[in-house]
Image (cartoon, coloured by chain):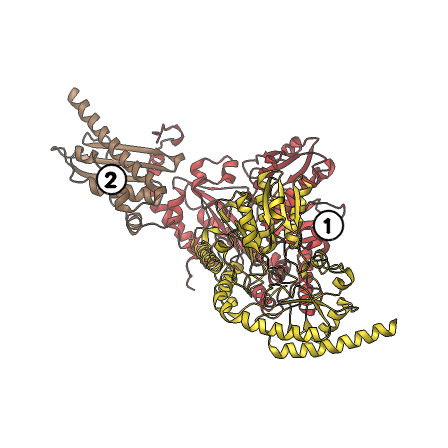
Chain colours: A red, B yellow, C brown
Amino acid sequence: MTVKTPIYLDYSATTPVDPRVAEKMIPYITEFFGNPASRSHSFGWTAEKAVENAREEVAKLVNADPREIVWTSGATESNNLAIKGAAHFYSGKGKHIITVMTEHKAVIDPVRELEREGFEATFLQPEPNGLVDIEKFKAAIRPDTVLASVMFVNNEIGVIQDIEAIGNICREHGIIFHVDAAQATGKVAIDLEKLPVDLMSFSAHKTYGPKGIGALYVRRKPRVRLEAQMHGGGHERGLRSGTLATHQIVGMGEAFRIAREEMELENARIRRLRDRLLAGLQEIDEVYVNGDLKQRVPHNLNISFNFVEGESLIMAVKDIAVSSGSACTSASLEPSYVLRALGRSDELAHSSIRFSIGRFTTEEDVDYTVALMKSKIGKLRELSPLWEMHQEGIDLSKVEWAAH
Amino acid sequence: MSSTYFDHNATTALDSRVLESMLPFMTAQHGNPTSRHSFGRHARSAIERAREQVADAVNAHPSQVIFTSGGTEANNLAVTGIAGRYGASQIVVSDIEHPCISRPAQALQQRGWKLAVLPVDRHGVVQESGVEELLRTETSLLSVMLANNETGVLQKVAGIAAIARKHGVTVHTDAVQALGKMRVDFAELNVHAMTLSSHKINGPQGAGALILDKRIDIEPVIHGGGQEKGLRSGTENVAAIVGFGAACELLNARLLQEPGRIRQMREHLETGLKKLGAVIFGAEVERLPNTSFFAFNEIEGETLVMALDRKGFAVASGSACSSDSSEPSAVLLAMGVEADLAKGAIRTSLGAGNSAEQIDSFLAVLAGEIARLRHLTAVAV
Amino acid sequence: MAYSDKVLDHYENPRNVGSLDKNDPHVGTGMVGAPACGDVMKLQIKVNDSGIIEDAKFKTYGCGSAIASSSLVTEWLKGKSLDEAAQIKNSAIAEELALPPVKIHCSVLAEDAIKAAVADLKSKQSDKEVA
């Protein structure tokens, strides 16, 4: 079998829409195009029914009540609604928020915005393996802490936080607990009946659904209250106004149904591919895996190739579509803030590549990638004065570099 | 099950050419526009192409287009983003704005902003006369819609904008209902910000835009990855944006033929409605060519709408977004219409797929239903 | 990022990659930049007895533009005297490679590398004279 390039290994940035999902969506943009808020005719009712079916599918994947699912335009909006909505609603109780330095920008930026409004925030530094130390989390709690936000699965390094343990601590202290699960659905089992989580953000397009649609889980028992961030026609029980994009909601429902039914088998397959990729890449000298390898989704492998510069690396591997740093920050040349928070040097952060594997990745794709990386890393190191110095036994950290 | 769709102000069917443009981005072209690899770059250039198409449709510059998830979000961004930026000040909105203008304005009011409301006359036209007086108070934003979603009545936005500009006040217009039904020219309207929506012009749901004069200070409502120059974070809905662009490109051709044809159909419809004794709201002033908002004395609107649906006609009672409640239309109340009559109001909004034959059969069915309901009511009394 | 064809050509087929013996009295070595900044350039020149550069080698840790800039100057340096070499300006490099504004610093680095290599060689030669 020949491999078709470029090979897509950037499933953490976005996933292709599963053909079964696309098929389900099409009738709702052509035939059943009603506005689900139209209550006076069957075009509207058909759309509304489809929306409610999809709500049920989303709820089922995470074992929640459909009434706890609020549609949004995506995980970014869900995170904004959860964080600003809860902080504003509960601001009478206190104005301190705890989150983590390695959160997605869609969590960090709303928290920063709240800081400008007069809230205080603690950004916890994770351990070098990317995981939050539970004791450090406890120590950050103050009497006026009202909200904590910790992501389930990190988008850059794939590590899985101990949501249950952190949630239990939040419960003990009466802190509203939000979890960004955009990278978790279909990858880790989520049971919101058991997990002590109050708010959870979801995205469709990271789980083989369409872009432009997401959801926020808002716990009913005990009830969590939010201040709406988008006002208007009073859709979604007043929590999120705006005409719902029926076909996209239908797509998210179908994508989450498929995830529920197939994740177990799929994750086993993806783990085998990841192990194969890792074994292959580890045959190269001086490679470092970023983030804990055990407490991690198998879909993600983030590796630094020492003595190779990041941008030239990306140029060298253009036959594979991968990401250096998070997709959302890769427009700038800053080294990944996530890797820096783990204590990685700028050089290692610069030379990192996130390989993310998904539903349509094949063994041939992995083998091609390994062979390509071996040859390109070899070539770039041949060019690298740092590699030469390393070979000569020079400790680069002791070199005094000419400032420039 | 309805088969004749007379609710184009609520949402429209997707144009098949628009669908064609979207399909690749729903399947093979799946990149995240922020990604630097080829998948990402394809998605990025598709968005930039759509940005040009949207700008061209309303005589704006592509750099003035901020894509959002729809009209509601664009209106929220305009109100919260512009007025919110100034600190507590006055916001002026008309009495007939869509809730996605009035509600965010009320939310700011709760946080200390002053909210002033511009009244409408009995035809549903926002009065210019009071504007000057209101703007003597330090005002951060004035928002008046271009065409009302329920009555279709057009507003004198350019005139109001001229007064506001004299006072250095930022003006926004919600052009969601106007786009596609009349010529919309951002430069001519002389406003600073304007809201558009895709699904009202045979584009897909899930995309809209705020057209914004770049000199206006604005802060985002959704924070995060910094997309849309930081004004609207979140992975772009590529397929919907591409569809929105394609729908905009089709507008110019459509505006050359459609309004005349639709206006004729509407005249035909309203002649029939008047014969049946309907009161047509806003009929004496300039309206969108497709919209009729009417009521019959002593006929329950809700019941009539349901009966019409059973006979195959999809119409609206009140506006779609507030149709959850059986409250009389706030727009009609603002126009001074009696609550009893307002409760019975029905809106038909014609569109691309409609024909004169549909109007004829609608009028016939309506006549029958009205006779039946009048008979029932008479018996009940 | 869109690279010019010339950058891509030098990146795909870099000229004069390698190292010269840095202890050779006819070899001058310039090493500029820092790993933390994302660019390190090592440029070496070898002069013959009449002071003409007869060989130039480079190794670069950096982006495609940095690699192309250093590859290009190794071509330009051969056959030049030290004084001529010192006159190569970053603007000429940037122009030849059509570098975008965000990549101008790569050409600056290449110019610095030439100066450092020339300075190293000159100091070796003056040491010899003193000795």
Direction front: furthest residue = B129
Q: Please tell me in which quadrant of the rendered image residue A319 appears.
A: bottom left
Report the side of B63 relative to B201 (left or right).
left
Where is B117 relative to B330, above or below?
A: above
Q: Could one spot residue B225 in this view of the protein?
A: no
Q: Where does the C terminus of chain B fall, quadrant-wise?
A: bottom right
Question: In front here: C118 or B156?
Answer: B156
Tell me the amino acid under the disc marked 2. Answer: Lys
Residue at 71% across, 76% down: B275
Total numbered circles: 2
**Helix, strand or loop at mark 1:** loop
Q: Tell me the chain of label 2.
A: C
**Disc 1 sits on a residue from what chain?**
A
Going by the image, does C28 lie left or right of C106?
left
**Dot 1 and dot 2 within a common chain:** no
Secondary structure at numbered mark 2: strand
Label 1 CA crowd tier, 10 Å (few <14, some 14–19, many 20+): few
The disc label shown at residue B164, or none: none
Q: Residue furthest left?
A: C50
* Quadrant of residue B158 within the rendered picture: bottom right
The residue where tag 2 is placed is C57
Q: Is residue B42 visible?
A: yes
- List the residue tagged with mark 1: A193
Q: Position of residue B43 (x, y in %)?
A: 46, 57
Please tell me which residue lies in front, A135 or B143: B143
